[in-house]
Amino acid sequence: MKKKNFIVIESPFADDEVTNIMYLELCIWHSISQGETPFASHGFYTNFLDDLDPWQRKIGIRMGLEIASHAYKTALYTDLGVSRGMLIGELDAQEMGRPVERRAMFEFGRIPTRGEITERLCKIKVECEEKTMGNV
């Protein structure tokens, strides 16, 4: 049975990994602030598998799609663009009949700076803490 609040997050990972990991943290906190339970395979498996090794990348994608099969929805966070890996996740969701929601947290068409990502992250964390005080 799929839980209505369990979602998969798709966001860029390769290229500027520092910015993309900062952005992924923001995406996760944004999802939490929406009452969701997010999972991002690229934020987990890349700690143990080499994303630059095609064989290990393939394993990570396969395992991520297996976990995604239990999710209610896939959220594509698009502020930094849409990567090849994100498209794989989107196509899998469509093939599995899982809703896909495209999300952006910044002004459309403008790529946020690291400072803007950090500022938004701090704001969302404070909002989440205020909302959940005493509910944990």
Image (cartoon, grey):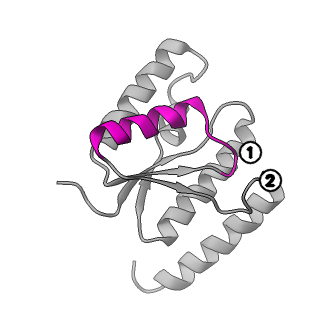
Give the side of residue 65 with respect to residue 129, left or right: left
Give the side of residue 131 with respect to residue 94, left or right: right
**Residue that label 1 marks:** 19
User: How far apart are the alpha carbons under marks 2 and 1?
Assistant: 6 Å
Q: Position of residue 35 (x, y in %)?
A: 42, 71
The image shows residue 65, relative to residue 2, as above or below, that is above
Q: Position of residue 22 (x, y in %)?
A: 69, 50
**Residue that label 2 marks:** 114
- Say what secondary structure mark 2 lies in: helix
Q: Residue at x 36, y 52 (%)?
A: 99
Of helix, strand and loop, which mostly describes the magenta segment? Answer: helix
Q: Residue at x 61, y 71 (%)?
A: 125
Q: Position of residue 107 (x, y in %)?
A: 74, 63
- Say what secondary structure mark 1 lies in: helix
Amino acid type of the residue that numbered disc 1 sits on in the rendered structure:
Thr
Stretch of the chain drawn in magenta: 79-97
The image shows residue 36, relative to residue 25, as above or below, that is below
Q: Residue at x 27, y 46 (%)?
A: 70
User: Could you say which is closer to the camera, residue 96 or residue 55?
Assistant: 96
Q: Position of residue 80 (x, y in %)?
A: 70, 46
Amino acid type of the residue that numbered disc 2 sits on in the rendered structure:
Arg
Q: Which mark is residue 3?
A: none
- Whether residues under marks 2 and 1 lie with C-beta atoms below 8 angstroms apart, the answer is yes
Number of marks present in the image shown: 2
Q: Spot the residue most to the left.
A: 1
